[in-house]
Amino acid sequence: MMSHKSEELQAFLCPDGFRQLPVPGGMAYARQDVDEKQLQALLTYEGEVLKTSEKSRVRRLGHWVIKETRHGLASGLVGHGRSRSRAPWIALHYLRQHGVRVPEPLAYVEYGRLGMVKAGAQIFQYLSFSYDVETYLSMRIREGVDGEAIAAFLAELARAVNKLGESGAWHADLSGKNIMTRDGAQFYFVDLEAVEIGCVYDDEKRLKNHIQLYDSFCDALSDALLVPFIDAILPNNLDLRVWMPRVRQAQRERRARIEARWAKYGPPERLNPLRAFRFDQPHEQER
């Protein structure tokens, strides 16, 4: 999704250090040191399939992830399909330029003709030895980490979230599964299809992000840890005493909707591992 001036964002399609390469049935935008043979190998070899869905497939080949997406007829129409296909690639470059950690981009390929995009592929860094923050924290809890270390982890995560907010981009799905870390100190944002560039980070968008983050951790962590975390990502003009009840209430409603959907259709393949540490005691202090 992009709401910024398209002509300004197009500079991120093929920025400095990248070049255009023709591929059968389409065009690629690849790092300068990638040649046609290397690109074709990445696009052709099966590698390890990480995830599949009706319209996409994600696989790993060595140090790289290849995410292939197919577009339907309606979404492939001139303009709309092209913008949608390019958006996560442009977001990679935009966020990197603004100091936000994301996987390193290698190449983007779009297949189609006459302005219509039938399919696309992004190739970017595989974050070796990294875990999403939900999994990382669940591992640390099992190892016996103390509250002080968890607070330090949340403080570093808050700094990364604030950096993202200051960049002029908004991640519409800022749940813990879309934030990766190797050491609990440096954080990488993924699932960039959900990034909107150039929008106003208003209270509605901020509240959505805070609900997503709170929902990611509240099964395992009490408000003694989570209230300071939310406070660290809350601007000074908003009152925490008013804000936290809104976050808690909306999180409960969100969780109820999700679990009702699971009851009807079955749970997803991946569940937040922090649910195993479910914290069911009432909040110590409503503030």
Image (spheres, rainbow, N blue to C red):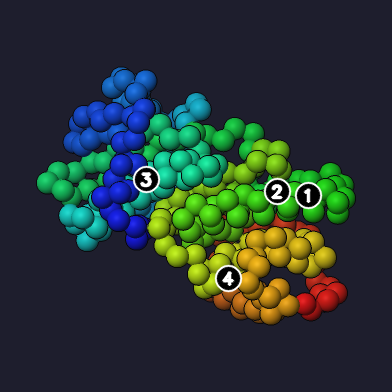
Image quadrant holding the C terminus, namely bottom right
Residue receiving disc 2: 156
Position of residue 109 measured from the top left corner of the image (x, y, whole percent): 30, 37
Q: Is residue 283 above or below residue 186?
A: below
Q: Pointers 1 and 4 in contact (CB under 8 A)?
A: no
Dot 4 falls on a residue whose secondary structure is: helix
Q: Amino acid at mark 1?
A: Ala
Image quadrant holding the N terminus, namely bottom left
- Circle nearer the N terminus (3, 1): 3
**Between residues 271 and 155, which one lies in front from this camera angle?**
155
Position of residue 26 measured from the top left corner of the image (x, y, whole percent): 21, 37
Q: Amino acid at mark 4?
A: Leu
**Residue 74 falls in image quadrant:** bottom left
- Circle nearer the N terminus (4, 2): 2
Density class for disc 3 (Cα within 10 Å; few <14, some 14-19, many ≥20) is: many
Q: Is residue 27 visible?
A: yes
Residue receiving disc 1: 152
Q: Is residue 266 above or below residue 253?
A: above
Residue receiving disc 4: 207
Q: For this view, does 226 lie left or right of residue 44?
A: right
Q: CA distance from mark 1 to mark 2?
A: 6 Å
Q: What's the residue at 65%, 41% (across, down)?
A: 186
